[in-house]
Amino acid sequence: MGAKLIITLDEEATQNYLGYARKMVEAEVNEDCEPSGITISVSICPPYGATVFAGPTEFGEADVVLKD
């Protein structure tokens, strides 16, 4: 079996993401649109860590582990 990349948002990043997602979904539903979902990206820069974004919005830090 191959390796797995495990990405875990820290508590602050999780709360920031959930607040962002809540606002987006609420705005889309209020406009009578189907929620579109959110694409997040993780910038991994050893040895400095990993940062989570949605477009230009930064949510915070993530732990990244490569597991066999």
Image (spheres, helix red, strand yellow):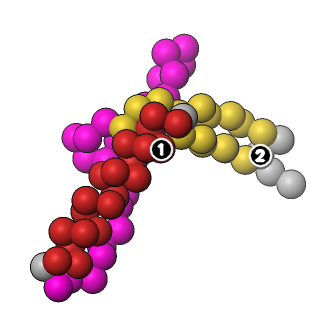
Res 10 quadrant in image: top right
**Which element is circle 2 on?**
loop
* Three-letter amino acid code at the position of disc 2: Ala
Q: As rendered, which of 63 and 24 lies closer to the eye?
A: 24
Answer with left or right where residue 45 lies relative to residue 36: right
Q: Quadrant of the N terminus?
A: bottom right
Q: Is residue 60 visible?
A: yes
The mark nearer the N terminus, 1 or 2, is 2
Residue 14 in the image, given as x and y percentages of width and height? 47, 44
Mark 1, residue position = 14
**Residue range highlighted in magenta:** 32-58
Name the outermost residue toward the right. 1
Mark 2, residue position = 3
| Neighbours of disc 2 within 10 Å: few (<14), some (14-19), many (20+) | few
Instruction: Give the mark toward the camera: 1 or 2.
Output: 1
Q: Is residue 31 magenta?
A: no
Q: Is residue 38 magenta?
A: yes
Q: Is residue 52 visible?
A: no
Residue 19 in the image, given as x and y percentages of width and height? 34, 51
Answer with left or right where residue 1 lies relative to residue 60: right
Q: Which mark is residue 31?
A: none
